[in-house]
């Protein structure tokens, strides 16, 4: 994980949030992506950790490929990604 997102990775691990995937994802334009089993409050995390402007929000709303919301370092091509909040009611229905 790049130096720009390392602090966020340590923060989430310190909260004992399960890591569900780590590695190279679907594209050569991605280096290391870590997925966590939580919803990330993007604006709050950007402010809390003073992330640089090149760390930007990533959002996928396509349920076929897997909805997700996270932060991508456009400089290093690394990302920390969580669940998409819009997808949670569907997940909850399936689990119930």
Image: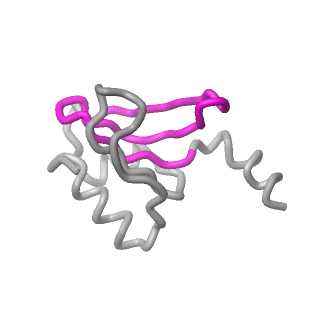
Determine which quarter of the picture holds residue 26. top left
In this view, 90 is above or below 64: below
Across and down, in percent, residue 75 comes to 18, 31
Across and down, in percent, residue 27 comes to 37, 27
In this view, 67 is above or below 47: above
Query: Looking at the image, which residue is at 18% across and 47% down?
Result: 2
Task: Assign the magenta stretch its main secondary structure.
Answer: strand
Q: Residue furthest left?
A: 3
Left or right of residue 54, residue 27 in this image: right
The way the protein has been coloured in the rendering is one colour
In this view, 15 is above or below 57: below
Query: Looking at the image, which residue is at 44% across and 51% down?
Result: 35
Determine which quarter of the picture holds residue 72. top left
The verdict on residue 61 being magenta is yes
Left or right of residue 67, residue 91 in this image: right
Across and down, in percent, residue 63 comes to 66, 32
Across and down, in percent, residue 58 comes to 42, 32
In which quadrant will I find the C terminus? bottom right
Query: Looking at the image, which residue is at 35% across and 44% down?
Result: 33
User: Which span of residues is magenta-colored?
Assistant: 56-83
Left or right of residue 26, residue 96 in this image: right
Query: Looking at the image, which residue is at 28% across and 65% down?
Result: 10
The verdict on residue 48 being magenta is no
Given residues 30 and 50, the one toward you in this image is 30
Q: How many marks?
A: 0
């Amino acid at each position: 994980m790049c130096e720009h997102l390392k602090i966020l990775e340590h923060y989430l691990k310190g909260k004992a949030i399960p890591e569900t995937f780590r590695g190279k994802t679907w594209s050569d334009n991605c280096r290391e992506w870590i997925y966590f089993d939580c919803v990330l409050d993007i604006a709050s995390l950007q402010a809390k950790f003073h992330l640089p402007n090149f760390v930007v929000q990533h959002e996928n709303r396509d349920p076929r490929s897997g909805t997700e919301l996270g932060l991508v370092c456009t400089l290093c091509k690394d990302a920390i990604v969580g669940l998409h909040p819009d997808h949670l009611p569907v997940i909850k229905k399936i689990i119930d």
